[in-house]
Amino acid sequence: MLRDRLGRFEHELLLAVMRLGDEAYGMTIRRELAAHTGREVAVGAIYTALTRLEVRGFVQSKLGDPTPERGGKAKRFYRVLAPGKRAVAKANAILLGLAADPGRDPEQS
Amino acid sequence: MSAPHTAAAPPRLARWLLRRALDGPARSAILGDLDEEFSRFVVPQRGLRNARRWYWRQALTSIAACARAAAVANREPDEPRPTVREIMNDSHGWGTDARAALRFCTRSPLTSVAVILTLAIGVGANTAVFSVVNATFFKSLPIATASRLVAIDDRDGGSFTYPEYLDARTAPGLSALVAGGRTSTTMGEGHARRRIVIDMVTANYFTALGVGAPALGRLLAAEDDASGSAPAIVLSYPFWQDELGSDRSIVGQTVKLQHAFFTVVGVAPDGFAGIHPGFSPDVWVPLTHAPEIERNASMLGNRSAWLGLVGVLERPETLPITRDALAARWQTTRKDADVVVTPIPRGLMGWGPARDVRLRILSVFVVLMLAIACLNVATLLAAGVHERQKELAIRASLGAGRTRLLRQLLLEQLVLAMLGGAAGGVLGSWISRAIAPMMAGEMTPGDLDVRADVNVVLFTIAVSIVVALLVALIPAVRWSKVNTLVALQGGGSGMQRLLRSAGLWWLIPAQVALGTVLLASAGVLGKTVQQLKLGIESSAPDRVWFANLQVDTLGPEPREFDDFQRRLRAHLQSMPGVEAAGIVTGRPLASVRRGPLRVEGMTVVPKSKPMPWGPPPPPPPRGAMPPEKLWFVSNSYVSPGLFASLALPIVRGRDFTDGDRLGAPRVAIVNESLAAQAFGKNDPIGRRVGWPPGKGFDIEIVGVVRDFRSEHLREAAPDAIFFPLVHVPAGETGDRSVTGAAEPIDVTLVLRGATARSLDRDRVMQHMIAFDPRLFVDRIWTFDEEAGRALSDERLLATIGTILSGIALALLIVGVYGAFASAVIRGRRELGIRLALGATPRVVGRMVVARSLSVALVGVLIGLPLSCAFTRSFAHLLYGVKPIEPLVVGATVAIVLATAAVSAFLPARKAAQVDPLVALRSE
């Protein structure tokens, strides 16, 4: 069960990637996270987390085209795979369940 | 490096760092993302300056994140993180690490040798002092009965008579009782006599104490006490070895002790040196034959209390039984019926608190030294760890966890520390053998058995372990912070950050602080020695020779002595190279004689100056004036020429002459101090005084001599009066022996050589033999040696303090140099940037020296209060110098700061020579 648990940062990261759709690569993910969380995240941290998620089969990456403003470096685009989406849904449910009315039993919902 | 340096470009250094620190596919993506965001969003939104700062932050935090991730990824994903215990139990890894540690030690032999040497000095000094402490306080006597041995005293520590001993022998609870007394006498005849220390003991001494088998012959046996027996003598092992050249034929030979002949029956076992540790006798004789030595038959009577009693209990628990029985027994015969029975497993300790103070100071010295050595080694090793970051990183990337790396570092340092400890143990046993004789003073023993025993070995091992942990943990703990520092490195600004990041910033001030304490203490002690010597310097002590002479060739007639001293003086003056010669009773700087002086016409009796040491003056006989109404002054009997040979000028009146003979009017010379006390500003010449046993004022003062600290170097000159040698009362010159027998006339010859080299021991001896071969010249020594003996405590402490301070300073130089040299190497880039931005080499060099000085200053500021507190604790040992002496403090600060500046000089020059282009490109 622990294998598909998401850390908070991983959770945010996957949500950001899903939100960005086809435009999800390092810089945009970073800006998306910064815009929504107000935290300046290191781009290195994003890549290490994504690499970990990739190993677990939650995301997939592919190389894009190099652009001149990137000094000739290719973008690395990310896409959330089905297990990743399931993990996100589960994490969402946990948060929502916790945020719901205290009187209600989550098993009955 | 070829990228164009446009205004919107990200910081080159940060970018370079990123490229270096990252690897794998993420590198190019991260670089691309940062560049893109930098130019597209950050610069337009925040401005170039903040954008660059943003880039730096991104670069460094990204590196840190990737480094962390790499460390995590290097472990098997599912394997739980190994605990410290698991790593320690991993025997395979231990072997590898141990090999790696040994390899490391041999790879940088210079550092290893420096570390081992430094630790050896620190541990060695501690081992040496502990050996002395151990020998003084902890060593049991090497005899079977040590645990049951007790000293029997009355409350005042008084002595016992022989009949009392015989009576006490049968006390319950005692398995044996031994009595003994000590005296010094001569062995041999004529000028070939030598002075020896004899213990007069009951014949059961060796058997009762359980002393092992003799080295030669036999020990004393019960029949040696019998009155009809031939007097037997047992030699101590060192005496037999050193004085008699281990002559095996000595057993059965006859030796003469002063007046009596004894037959050598054996030699005590090696290692048994009596029951006074450090004060070993040369020989033992049965005390029933002691009266023959000094021809004093009353020694064994019931009025002559001179024996110390040492009992051997049946069991340790029988002590109270014995004590109560003895108290009951002596209730009627002794006034002080209080009997004190003390266990003495370590023997009878004869010395007072002075010794403790010296050992305490020495202990503080060597602990300081050890702390400095540890800090120094930690500095060296920390710098070494820093330089090996690349190697450690490689090992980490090959799969070694941080704990594993820590273990390797610890092992390396433990190996070094243990080697240092072992070397220190060996060094310490050498040093202890060297300082044990130095510890000998007037009142303290010189033959302590400082050979290493279990205590010393355990102590050395314990110290080594503590040292090993200290020196290994400081760099290792520092290293545990390296990971984040790696990331921060390069982001540092200025030397301060550099030093701080190197983890050295507190090691150096700590060393400086401890070194300051050592230096300041050695300073005040050295000043004390210098001040004490000032008092005798004017007499050129290296040219003055003393010879102790025992005159027992004369009859009782005073004329004979008068004639003798006249001939002797003429003979001495005829000696080539002698500038002046005189004869004096007593021994300058070593003997104190006081007597009550009466001054004609004096109404107010001056206060007697306190005795510098020794027993208080004897109580006055019945009917005499109470002591507070008497003026006790120093007195001695001197021949003409004595003052000249000590270079003491006669400031008024005249010296003694040959005209001051027996039968001539009695005269005296006083010193300035006495003259001022007795006569104020009036002329003392021609005034009259009285001296016991005379009743009237029959002595005329004929001269005033310059003051001289004749009794003790620490005391001001006593009020002193001098009488002509010919008036010496018969039998009053010698000290009385412990048994109360008068000793032969004891005088000191004083010879003043024309130069420091015009006299020597052999020539003085030959000259005396030529005068009369029967005379016993006890000892020949120089004034310098006498002063040295009087100063032995202070000089010992000052010498050791100075040596240790010197070592501390040398270590400080190495430490500061090492720290700053490596700081400069690591900070080359920053220095390069500074130089590129317009700092001149001179400014950069000055910056390094200033940093070193400020670091040292911090240490001095911490060290000065500490040293004040320490020197205050032995203020009573100081003379002519305050615990906080401005001169010493100033010199200490100057020396420490100069050391810091000098040792930073080379790194500073290196820093100034940094070529900015090379520095920035080379990395």
Image (tube, helix red, strand yellow):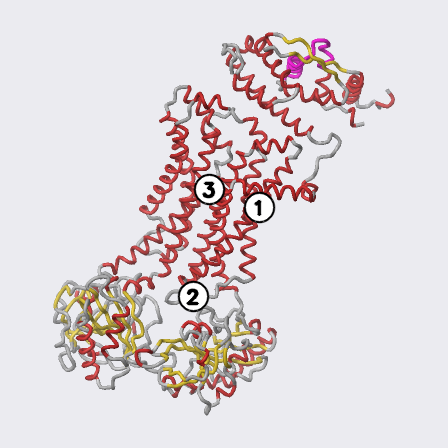
Which mark is first along the chain, 3 or 2? 2
Residue type highlighted by circle 2: Gly
Q: Earlier in the sequence, mark 1 or mark 2?
A: 2
Identity of the residue drawn at 49% across and 36% down: B504
* Marks 1 and 2 belong to one chain: yes
Q: Which residue is mark 3?
A: B510
Q: Nearer the viewer, residue B728 or B556?
A: B556
Q: Is residue B29 above or below residue B772?
A: above
Q: Mark 1 and mark 3: span between their CA atoms? A: 22 Å
Q: Position of residue B674 (x, y in %)?
A: 21, 66
Q: Nearer the viewer, residue B653 or B919?
A: B919
Reply above or below: B42 against B911.
above
Secondary structure category for the residue under label 1: helix
As drawn, the residue found furthest toward the bottom would be B228
**Magenta stretch holds residue A25:** yes
Is B746 placed left or right of B513 in the picture?
left
Q: Which residue is mark 2?
A: B352
Q: Give the residue displayed 54% in from the left and 62% down from the top.
A: B453
Picture quadrant where residue B323 is located: bottom right
Locate residue B848, reporting x and y percent.
40, 31
Which residue was labeled with disc 1? B414
Point out the stretch of residues depicted in magenta: A15-38
Q: Which marked residue is nearer to the observer: mark 1 or mark 3? A: 1
Looking at the rendered structure, the kind of residue marked 1 is: Leu
| Sequence-wise first label, 1 or 3 | 1
